[in-house]
Image: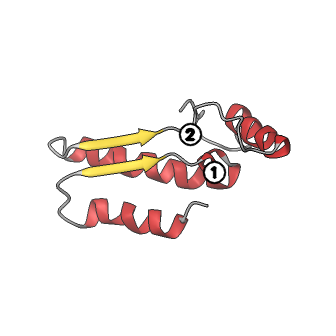
């Protein structure tokens, strides 16, 4: 499970402290769930803002949640993840392509 509060605290630190580098790793299938759309967007926005405002700061981001997953995922959960990934929730301002 993704700890949304920990992510939000880390994202706040990107703008509030002297950041010298960023490594963001998003590999859990939970990132595909509709409940995390807002957090995905907040993460995208914070990292983009840092990249635009301070281009000298190295940013490495690893996103593997778009890799097809069929092992160890119950069929009902796999269907839910695939639906969230392809359709997105109503009102999502972006199409998730990653």
Quarter of the N terminus within the rendering: bottom right
> Is residue 46 shown left or right of residue 74?
left
Q: Secondary structure at mark 2?
A: loop
From the top left corner, tell me how far across and down residue 42 is, in percent. 48, 53
Q: Nearer the viewer, residue 59 or 95?
A: 59
Residue at the (58%, 53%) spot, across then down: 38
- Is the residue 42 above or below the residue 8 in the image? above
At a point 38% along the width and 52% down the height, the residue shown is 46
Q: Disc count in the image? A: 2
Q: Residue furthest right?
A: 76
Q: Is residue 2 left or right of residue 80?
A: left
Q: Earlier in the sequence, mark 1 or mark 2?
A: 1
Comparing 50 with 23, the one in front is: 23
- Residue 65 — which label? 2
> Which residue is labeled 1 in the image?
30
Query: In the rendered image of this protein, does residue 4 appear above or below residue 58?
Result: below
Horizontal and vertical percent position of residue 63: 47, 39
Q: Nearer the viewer, residue 57 or 89?
A: 57
Q: Is residue 46 above or below residue 97?
A: below
Q: Residue at x 62, y 46 (%)?
A: 29
Q: Secondary structure at mark 1?
A: helix
Rounded to the nearest angstrom, the CA distance separating label 1 from label 2 is 8 Å
Looking at the image, residue 12 lies above or below residue 76:
below
Query: Could you say which disc has been placed on residue 11 in the image?
Result: none
In which quadrant of the rendered view does residue 79 lie?
top right
Name the colouring of the figure. Answer: secondary structure
- The x, y position of residue 70, in whole percent, is 71, 34
Which quadrant holds residue 90? top right
Residue 83 located left or right of residue 13: right
Badge 1 density bin: few <14, some 14–19, many ≥20, Cα 10 Å: some
Dots 1 and 2: beta carbons under 8 Å?
yes
């Amino acid at each position: 499970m993704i700890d949304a509060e920990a992510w939000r605290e880390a994202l706040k630190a990107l703008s509030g402290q002297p950041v010298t580098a960023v490594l963001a790793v998003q590999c859990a299938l939970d990132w595909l769930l509709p409940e995390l759309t807002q957090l995905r967007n907040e993460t995208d926005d914070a990292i983009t803002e840092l990249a635009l405002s301070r281009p000298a700061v190295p940013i490495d981001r690893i996103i593997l949640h778009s890799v097809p997953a069929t092992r160890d995922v119950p069929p009902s959960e796999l269907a839910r993840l695939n639906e969230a990934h392809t359709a997105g929730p109503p009102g999502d301002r972006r199409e998730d392509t990653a």
